[in-house]
């Protein structure tokens, strides 16, 4: 088959877990299957209300019918209309789903006639592509895109809030229509598969973990430091690791690889502690060395979709310390066997770190078990779930 992976390209550009997943899947399809595959990406800015809607519109207009199969995995890639469409779900726009601020209303209420007409469409029974086009046209009139006449009343300022109830209703409406033609659903973890509202009601969803696209890991060495690699963003909870490290003895070191918007705050939190080192961006070769020389890998994000770091660490024969609420990141870890699963607070994390710090033999044994477990996660399994029977 001719297969197209369709995906958003972050604005500003970031190479994270999603990008590594697409790269690994694409490489496997072309190297190890009879199929030929490529990836189509569109810039996916989401800094405000207008950019989010515009991104959804542009993906909905993609015509990929000349190819035999489309695989989407992240919003708004699934907006493309194709009769042979598989969704391998990473996540929708989480800030409008399960992490939507609780203090905000779930629906938008207003007396503005143009917005009321839009809300009638969003809440109505018409879930067709024609209704989708009408939605984009109505939003265009509200925001100025394609406006042919002046609105009788000014649009309330809170209508364009992001996150906010109006954009939430628009995105949910678009996602329902985009997913209505998907032929098969899969998810990158049990955590994603089980989240309310991610998939159409009654949809059958198979969870299958993606493999790492790092294929050759260095032989493990008996390292002394703890290591984490992540985007420096609040949901990754690097601050918990810094606070935990501060509770340990003077010879316990934490090395942090990655960049992100939370970097300044995290450096202030670390202060002048010489044991806590920020490495910035590291390439694959340096990353392999850092894994090989670590005592253990720490990864405690909040409700992570999957957490490729967990699997990479296990393939590198390193135990993983993760948290009970870390979502997909904790699915591969067996507490006390391939790593340690702790409560999400600095005291508990520090205790787990201390256990591995004072017992290198235990860390080695856990790491060997972790490597054995990680070898069971392969792209062959993923493709068996995504493609089986769809070429007939």
Image (cartoon, rainbow, N blue to C red):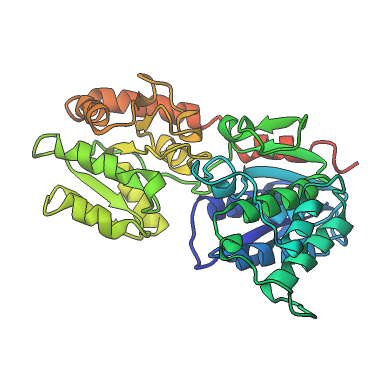
Q: Total marks drawn?
A: 0
Which residue is located at x 35 percent, y 60 percent? 281
Q: Is residue 30 visible?
A: no
Q: Specify the farthest residue to the left.
A: 250
Q: Residue at x 72, y 35 (%)?
A: 385
User: Quadrant of residue 132 in the image?
Assistant: bottom right
- Taking depth in this image into account, of 268 and 36 the one nearest to the observer is 268
Q: List x then y, in percent, for residue 229.
A: 36, 48
Expressed as whole percent of the image width and height from the top left, the position of residue 58 reads 73, 67
Q: Quadrant of residue 295?
A: top left
Query: Relative to 239, does residue 244 appear above or below in the rendering?
Result: above
Residue toward you, 75 or 186:
75
Left or right: residue 2 versus residue 21 is right
**How far across and how far down the image is residue 106, in percent?**
61, 44
Position of residue 226 in the picture relative to residue 321 (left or right) = left
Report the front residue among 176 and 102.
Answer: 102
Is residue 108 depicted above or below 281 in this figure?
A: above
State the residue lying farthest toward the right.
392
Q: Residue 6's image quarter?
A: bottom right
**In this orientation, which residue lies closer to the viewer: 301 or 99?**
99
Residue at the image point whose x is 12% and y is 50% from the top: 273
Q: Is residue 73 visible?
A: yes
Residue 149 position in % (x across, y down) = 78, 80
Q: Quadrant of the C terminus?
A: top right
Q: Would residue 102 be found to the left or right of residue 265 on screen?
A: right
Residue at (49% x, 48% y) in the render:
214
């Amino acid at each position: 088959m001719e297969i197209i992976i369709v995906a958003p390209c972050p604005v500003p550009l970031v190479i994270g877990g999603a990008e590594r997943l697409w790269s690994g899947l694409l490489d496997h399809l072309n190297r190890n299957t009879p199929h030929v595959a490529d990836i189509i990406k569109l810039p996916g800015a989401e800094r405000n209300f207008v950019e989010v809607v515009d991104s959804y519109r542009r993906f909905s207009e993609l015509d990929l019918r000349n190819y035999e199969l489309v695989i989407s995995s992240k919003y708004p890639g699934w907006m493309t209309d194709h009769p042979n469409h598989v969704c391998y779900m990473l996540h929708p726009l989480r800030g409008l789903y399960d992490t939507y601020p609780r203090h905000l209303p779930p629906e938008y209420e207003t007396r503005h006639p143009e917005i009321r007409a839009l809300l009638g469409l969003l809440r109505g029974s018409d879930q067709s592509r024609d209704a989708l086009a009408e939605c984009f046209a109505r939003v265009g009139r509200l925001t100025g895109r394609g406006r042919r006449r002046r609105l009788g009343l000014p649009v309330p300022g809170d209508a364009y809030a992001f996150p906010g109830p109006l954009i939430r209703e628009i995105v949910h409406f678009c996602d329902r229509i985009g997913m209505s033609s998907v032929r098969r659903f899969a998810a990158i973890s049990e955590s994603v598969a089980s989240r309310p509202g991610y998939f159409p009601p009654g949809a059958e969803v198979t969870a299958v973990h993606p493999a790492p696209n790092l294929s050759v890991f260095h032989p493990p060495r008996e390292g002394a430091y703890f290591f984490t690699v992540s985007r420096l963003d609040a949901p990754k909870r690097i601050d918990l690791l810094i606070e935990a490290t501060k509770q340990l003895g003077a010879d316990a070191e934490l090395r942090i690889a990655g960049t992100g918007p939370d970097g300044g705050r995290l450096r202030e939190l670390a202060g002048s502690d010489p044991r806590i080192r920020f490495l910035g961006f590291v390439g694959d070769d340096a990353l392999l060395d850092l894994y090989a020389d670590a005592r253990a890998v720490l990864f405690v994000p909040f409700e992570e979709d999957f957490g490729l770091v967990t699997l990479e660490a296990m393939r590198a024969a390193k135990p993983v310390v993760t948290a009970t609420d870390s979502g997909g990141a904790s699915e591969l870890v067996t507490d006390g066997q391939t790593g340690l699963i702790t409560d999400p607070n600095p005291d508990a994390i520090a205790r787990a770190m201390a256990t591995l710090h004072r017992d290198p033999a235990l860390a080695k044994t856990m790491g060997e078990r972790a490597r054995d477990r990680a070898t069971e996660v392969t792209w062959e399994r993923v493709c068996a779930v995504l493609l089986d029977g769809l070429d007939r």
